[in-house]
Amino acid sequence: MLRILAPDGELVAEPPATVDTRALYRAMTVARVFDRRGSALQRQGRLATYAPFEGQEAAQIGSVAALRPDDWLVATYRDAAAMWSQGYPMELLIAGRTGHEGGGAPPESVNVLPPSITVGAHMLHAVGLAWAERYRRSDRVALTMFGDGATSEGDFHEAMNFAGVYRVGCVFLCQNNGWAISLPTERQTAAATLADKAIGYGMPGVRVDGNDVLAVYEATEAAVLRARGGDGPTLIEAVTYRVGPHTTADDPGRYRAEEQTEAWRQRDPIDRLRRYLAGRGEWSRPWQDELEREAAGLVDAAVTAAEALPAFTAGEIFDATFAELPPLLAEQRGWATGAADPAGPA
């Protein structure tokens, strides 16, 4: 397993020279504040549901840090940190959780697809995007993120097989957080590691400490450069842990021991990077306080903006579906907006 930072923040390998560690720490701090606020908002009845990602900040922030702003990101309902870091507006991530349709409509300048709720299906979209970019003779790549549970879905195998055969510039990042809701990883695969699955599709498989942001960055950077150079896809297994529930509707105490969760809390990715920065004289308590104030301000502003979004009208729901409405939907739009008589001609 690739590792650069030990849990105590000590280097065990040479760190990448192409990354700003303080910027990574700032982004991870914002992600933690966002995540805890999301759970709180759901308990207050202001979000319909929420999928916490505490403990997975390094896997998300470290991987997208290796992308260019114009690269594609295709992620899941648990990847808000990665999506925000790659440009998806935070207020839209929140709005989507309230059920507002606008949450799934990022600005055209943002090459991030809306969060996928269907487990595994979005990987096919990432492969399609990467294939399209190659067809256009572009060097943009696509990074798709998914959990260990998605590797048991047929869409995972179809996406991996197509990407391998056609050597498209797609990076598959599996955040192996130990649990597919209540099913542990060892119950859903006979493979020694999930990274081993890459062999059957003719691509490299890399296993990395998913709580080590520097190692995640280094592994993803290598995979992105390989994809950008036309050498095909890579599967990365980032071994991490979901310390919270699957969603706010879940009780993890019914299927896992608290002792295991507590052991993973001792490997917290933000604490690990903080210890590293402190050892280099690049962290201080005043700076930490400043970061947390800034993060709270960003999240508060996003919540305010999300809750102020006007509701979609009946017409806009139809208009946001197709560029040109098929006749049947155009007729239904007329009914919904009162522009047509639903009873039809007399």
Image (spheres, grey):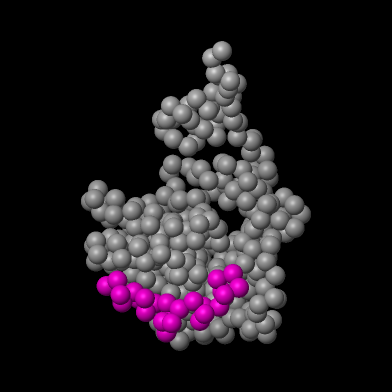
Residue drawn where x is 64% and y is 43% of the image: 305
Q: Does 108 sit left or right of 275 as displayed?
A: left
- The answer to which of 88 and 279 lies nearer the viewer is 88
Residue drawn where x is 33% and y is 69% of the image: 234
Q: Does 165 sit left or right of 250 as displayed?
A: left
The x, y position of residue 133, in whole percent, is: 29, 51
The x, y position of residue 131, in whole percent, is: 29, 54
Residue drawn where x is 43% and y is 82% of the image: 190
Residue 332 appears in the rendering: yes
- The answer to which of 275 and 184 lies nearer the viewer is 184
| Quadrant assignment for the C terminus | top right
Q: Residue furthest front?
A: 346
The x, y position of residue 172, in whole percent, is: 39, 66
Q: Quadrant of residue 296?
A: bottom right
Q: Does 167 sit left or right of 60 as displayed?
A: left
- The answer to which of 284 and 18 lies nearer the viewer is 18
The magenta segment: 179-205
The x, y position of residue 97, in whole percent, is: 62, 51
| Quadrant assignment for the N terminus | bottom left
Q: Is residue 271 magenta?
A: no
